[in-house]
Amino acid sequence: MTQHAYLDIHPEVAAALAAGQPVVALESTIISHGMPYPQNVETALQVEAEVRAHGAVPATIAIINGRLKAGLSRDDIEVLGKNGREVVKVSRRDIPFIVAAGQTGATTVASTMIVAAMAGIRVFATGGIGGVHRGAQQSFDISADLQELAQTPLAVVCAGAKSILDLGLTLEYLETHGVPVIGYQTATLPAFFTRDSAFKVDYRLDSPAAIAAVMKAKWDLQLQGGMVVANPIPAQYALSSASIDAAIEQALAEASTQGIGGKESTPFLLARVCELTGGNSLAANIQLVLNNARLAAAIASDYCRLHG
Ligand code: PSU
Ligand code: MN
């Protein structure tokens, strides 16, 4: 059996891919583990609508009853959102277990990239990528998202990474593995809720077309792997780092006292930061994902034009 025997591509997504039209992949861990219900479902549907409004077809990715899905129904999204943290969080390691057991799982950036690449999708929008955690010198907690970026060919549009992570070590890790970090209209790495951080991106590019040209060159040259497109949160929704830093410090301290580790670490920190900062950070989170969906649709359109 080939890998495609495990994959269901939604008819609308399949038609767009066959016609060389732009498609944007979206992940589902952000739905089940990244936001509370019902905002998670509303946001997932809004993000799909935003991709469409900007000329591309959305393909939200998950595993439903053991089937890899590129493109979900409204019911699938409702199930992932309503069951929230009871839905298994699936990264690269977990895929065969969830498939073999016929279970439903929410895909992380890493596993979304795997399924998207299988389907032939080249652009992916999300909120924030996983990375090297603070204290990784001791814990070795480094997201599988980074290894996936090293080997799977997608442009991942995000708002940088949350400062629950060590941004400096995350950049070093990506550099080692040949993954470029592009700043969209910025020379500094955005830190999710804030437009800036103390770190520089590798390359600043100011248009979707310039990003699409780099994608084409990289993959024409058969340089494996993906790239990070870091898109700052719109200024009117950005939070002050002072307001978010205290919540992040508290969440990290609680995780350490409670001995939270492994795959639970990121969902725990995300949920605590969200609780501690209240609706403020959730509203910002929703806006930055919509902003990334718009940019991803534009990049996908330019890439299709170039690539033919
Ligand atoms: N960061 C966020 N929101 C998220 C995630 C990260 O701000 O929802 C999710 C993504 O699905 C990402 C995953 O791929 O967490 C990383 O988990 P881990 O660190 O366990 O690899
Ligand atoms: Mn981890």
Image (cartoon, rainbow, N blue to C red):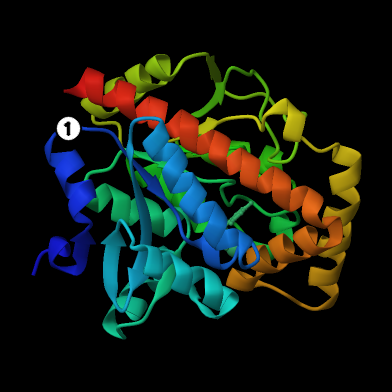
Side of 196 where 302 appears, left or right:
left
Q: Residue at x 43, y 55 (%)?
A: 110
Helix, strand or loop for disc 1: loop
Seen at 67% across and 72% down, the residue is: 261
The image shows residue 93 at horizontal and vertical percentages of 41, 69
Q: Amino acid at mark 1?
A: Gly
Q: Is residue 166 left or right of residue 258?
A: left
- Nearer to me, 140 or 9: 9
- Quarter of the rendered structure image containing ligand 2: bottom right
Q: Indicate the quadrant containing the C terminus: top left, top right, bottom left or bottom right.
A: top left
Q: Residue at x 80, y 49 (%)?
A: 280
Q: Where is 266 relative to 43, above or below?
A: below
Residue under label 1: 20
Where, by quadrant of the figure, is residue 291 drawn? top right
Of 49 and 66, which appears nearest the observer?
A: 49
Q: Would you say 124 lies left or right of 34 here? A: left
Residue 10, position as x, y percentages in the image: 23, 56
**Residue neighbourhood size for the residue with mark 1, other residues' Cα within 10 Å, grouped as few (<14), some (14–19), many (≥20):** some
